[in-house]
Amino acid sequence: MKIKNLLSVLFAVVIASAAAAKTVELLNVSYDPTRELYTEFNQAFAAHWKAKTGDDVNIKQSHGGSGKQARAVIDGLQADVVTLALAGDVDALHTVGRLIPADWQRRLPHDSAPYTSTIVFLVRAGNPKGIKDWDDLTKPGVAVITPNPKTSGGAQWNYLAAWEYARRKLGGDEQAKTFVRALYKNVPVLDSGARGSTTTFVQRGIGDVFISWENEAFLALKEFGADKFQIVVPSLSILAQPTVTVVDKVVKKKGTAEIAEAYLGYLYTEEGQDIAGRNFYRPAASEAAKAKYAGSFPQVELFTIDAAFGGWTKAKQAHFADGGTFDQIYQN
Amino acid sequence: MSLFGKRRNVLPGFGLSLGFTLAYLGLIVLIPLSAAFIKASGLSAADFWAAVTSPRVVASYKLSFGVSLLAALVNAVFGGILAWVLVRYTFPGRRMVDALVDLPFALPTAVAGIALATIYAAPTAVAPGGWVGSWLNPIWVDGITQLAELVPWIDWQGWLGGKLAFDRPGVFLALTFVGLPFVVRTLQPVLQELEPELEEAAATLGANRWQTMTRVIFPELLPALITGFALAFARALGEYGSVVFIAGNMPMHSEITPLLIITKLEQYDYRGATAIAVVMLVASFVLLLLINLLQKWSRRYYRV
């Protein structure tokens, strides 16, 4: 009897001490250019979680081309949350992997996109080729750097932005295809992800203009010097909405649902929004953050993928699936 | 009885060792490969055919098989010379050179690809270009331009590539790099075994040096040379890591087949990816079988 009591006391002590010093592990699978954003955000969230619950949280990050990252999660990478470049890639977690429910995008405010971005041009200092708008990218003698839209989420935004610009200016889808074909004739290297293209343009010095995420362009200016590059804003661009979600099946298995939801929820708080703005993402939720960073983002007319292309499923089918327009422009 | 019954091998243990060999081969080679076939068999015949004959895929076959063949041939010639030099001559630093040959085996292929791309990069308005690319690329561009003027009805730039790195020559450079050790390492032991007495005998029988080379030494080396060539070729066909960094990856022009397999995977088209893989497997198997037969034939032809 005594021994049994002693054991149960011991057991309780072990449990209690484990509970007191709990460390939760969280894996956030994200896309290429968000490294800096989430490094800062993770620290802020860990401090917030510690203050709130007393638990330590150890957040691991994984970065890569958005499509590749989605596939890794589908193939078994144990991501608690994904923060990918586009809703189409998160959608695959439902359609291919059955890891999340169909209505995932309605679970968080602003279509599960806590921050937005857009597509701009990065050119060499002094803009020697005189790049002003999308038309200039199709001119002979201009070398354009953009990743392969088959593998890069960012490149799909680029492609669709160019398409919509041409459709509005030239009048139809056929004209847009001709325009995009001329643009890709000017592309000398197709990297598989956004960071690879940044390296090609910045380190190797290839190309006159780099079609880039707005945040990636600002980051290049910050890292490599405003004396080497400058940003050119086209007359029309696309509202890029990188989306986030909890991966239901994984958090259920790991028992991390509560903290994973808190993690994503924190993106929508004043502090989360401020960090996004500081890292050159446009805050979507907080009016205060929007006002604070309004001056640092260029004014540009933005269209949404839903309005112009009827959503990601349709856009992917028409443009990036096998036999879609991207295949067609290279085949004849 | 025993005359018509089981034929007995002089060496014991045949049954056990064959059983072990088959089990091992099955576990390491056949099971993973059959998984590819099973996955691909989920496609209907029409879908399979559509997946493996789309223009982009066909263009990649031509590039992958063509450049792999070319790289293996170049490796056969220069790897052969290298092996000859390493075995037949002594010179300071020979051991160093010998060790260098194995580096492409050991180096992670991505490192090789990035290094090659950096070295062969062309000079641009804002970057000086790589060590080699800064002077060799202009020569290449010049050469292509002159060829195009001389023989304008052939699309030289389309076939050979308009620049070194990030174009077709880059694919060739990467594949030559990864294939080199195979030829050298298969030839070396054969060369070492080759007795100088053979050459001396040929000389005393009145053969000149050229005759000794072509009729005595070369036939002895040919089977090993073909094996080395086949290995280098097979390695080049499957190579992915180094090539994607230096090829430029332009659809219909400088995309290798393994890259298309990866691209299909990233679009969740697992079956389409395995369909292409199956085509590559079968084609490689047939080619390697042919090369093996050729090697057998060369052995018989020259040995008589």
Image (spheres, rainbow, N blue to C red):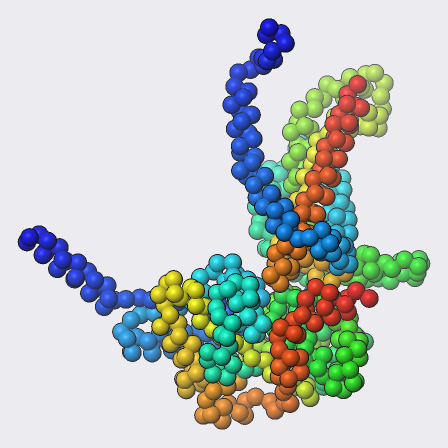
Q: Is residue A36 visible?
A: no
Instruction: Give coordinates of residue A268: x percent, y percent.
Output: 43, 83
Image quarter of residue A52 = bottom left
Q: In the picture, which quadrant includes the C terminus of chain A? A: bottom right
Instruction: Give coordinates of residue A251: x percent, y percent.
Output: 40, 66
Image quarter of residue A26 = bottom left
**A248 or A31: nearer the viewer:** A248
**A105 or B136: nearer the viewer:** A105
Locate residue A50 relative to residue B156 in the image: left or right: left
**A265 or A298: nearer the viewer:** A265
| Residue A90 in the image: above or below residue B157 | below
**B59 or B121: nearer the viewer:** B59
Instruction: Give coordinates of residue B143: x percent, y percent.
Output: 85, 58
Instruction: Give coordinates of residue B280: x percent, y percent.
Output: 69, 47
Please name the residue shown 27% across and 74% down the image: A54
Image quarter of residue A123 = bottom right
Please name the residue shown 53% across and 34% down the image: B24
| Residue B10 in the image: above or below residue A207 | above
Q: Is residue A257 visible?
A: yes
Please name the residue shown 77% across and 31% down the image: B294
| Residue B165 in the image: above or below residue A186 | above
